[in-house]
Image: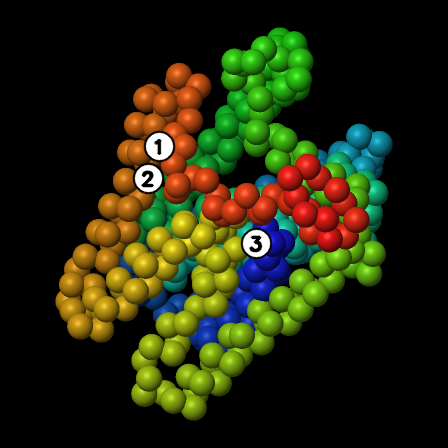
Amino acid sequence: MFFALTYGFGFATIASTLTHVGFFYGREIYERFRASYKEKEDIHTRLMRRYKDIPSWWFHVLLVVTILVSLILCIFLNKQVQMPWWGLLFASVLAFVFTLPISIITATTNQTPGLNIITEYIMGIIYPGRPIANVCFKVYGYMSMAQAVSFLSDFKLGHYMKIPPRSMFLVQFIGTIVAGTINVSVAWWLLHSIKNICQDDLLPQDSPWTCPGDRVFFDASVIWGLVGPKRIFGTLGNYTEMNWFFLGGALGPIIVWLFHKAFPKQSWIPLINLPVLLGATGAMPPATPLNYNAWIIVGTIFNFFVFRYRKQWWQRYNYILSAALDAGVAFMAVLLYFTVGMENREVTWWGTKGEQCDLATCPTAKGITVDGCPVR
């Protein structure tokens, strides 16, 4: 059930990102856009004037060349790529539209909502039955936006550290070319040198070439491209109610904004960031109640009491606690791998036994008979 809800939270996150940025930052975006033409510079911009700026035509040429090469792939290799030329342009427009609002959320919260779910959903609706086209649309729509946000983050760091802009551009450009070439070369070499790679049933039992990430990407292409969202979230599926998350996510920030205008003295109201809250909830994996109870106790109750009665402690130790919990997870992962994982053993105790209910694995549909389970 929670895995299904993760898609709903993903829908709500994308919708809330647009309305949250529009209502809370729309005026500021407009004013900063106008100020950029009036040469209102801050101290960092004045200090960066000593370096040569990046000519705009560098970006324009790179954009045109990239789109032309991609169009050539879509037109002349359409049987392999499956995506039509208009799908490429649509994905580019989608990435362009979402880059600004998602960049603002990233800059203010250090959390980056993704377009992976919405790109798969859109392409699966308008162009079903073509899994490779769905994957390509996802790459051009989602990964283009993600890389743009990453590059902007680098430029922002370079701006504050007073690194020459042209040097930043060249490092990003050359690094992308080198990384892409090496990744494709290594993947090509592995596919042609390792027999039965990624096929678990044909590989030795202790083979490391199980390719879990590739299987996830492949499964997504089958679910969204071949099966299609109409059979999952559409009229032919069982999860049509998940589409209401789009509306809920879009209306949520508006309600928060209205409360902020009605109670301007309450400084905590504008701190309610639904794109972050919904996105973080959607990122929670399917887990047992033990995990969720631990998160609630440590994350909610502890922070509430400390912030309520020892606000200075919360301000001083909250991020330290977060880092300590992350470090503890990493340390235990390494410890368990070397002590248990390398010996192909498992640690079984009440915290890993799941729902603590023997009947939790029994089917709930009527008429299905399974040994040890009641028949409905």
Q: Residue at x 78, y 59 (%)?
A: 234
Whether residue 154 sits left or right of residue 323 in the image: it is right
Circle 1 crowding by C-alpha within 10 Å: few under 14, some 14–19, many from 20: few
Q: Between disc 2 and disc 3, whose residue precedes?
A: 3
Whether residue 359 sits left or right of residue 75 in the image: it is left
Q: Is residue 313 visible?
A: yes
Give how far across and how far down residue 74 sits, in percent. Answer: 78, 38
Give how far across and how far down residue 365 sits, in percent. Answer: 74, 51
Which residue type does callout 2 highlight?
Answer: Val
Q: Quadrant of residue 373?
A: top right
What residue is disc 3 on?
2
Circle 2 crowding by C-alpha within 10 Å: few under 14, some 14–19, many from 20: few
Give how far across and how far down residue 287 sits, in percent. Answer: 48, 47
Give how far across and how far down residue 119 sits, in percent. Answer: 67, 51
Q: Nearer the viewer, residue 61 or 360?
A: 360
What residue is disc 1 on?
333
Q: Residue at x 30, y 27 (%)?
A: 335
Above/below status of 54 relative to 209:
below
Which residue type does callout 1 highlight?
Answer: Ala
Question: Considering the numbered disc 3 on the image, is that residue within a helix, a strand or a loop?
Answer: helix
Circle 3 crowding by C-alpha within 10 Å: few under 14, some 14–19, many from 20: few
Above/below status of 329 relative to 39:
above
Q: Between disc 1 and disc 3, whose residue precedes?
A: 3
Whether residue 10 sits left or right of residue 228 in the image: it is left
What residue is disc 2 on?
329
Whether tag 1 and tag 2 are in contact, CB under 8 A, the answer is yes
Which residue type does callout 3 highlight?
Answer: Phe
Question: Considering the numbered disc 1 on the image, is that residue within a helix, a strand or a loop?
Answer: helix
Picture quarter with the N terminus: bottom right
Q: Residue at x 21, y 66 (%)?
A: 306
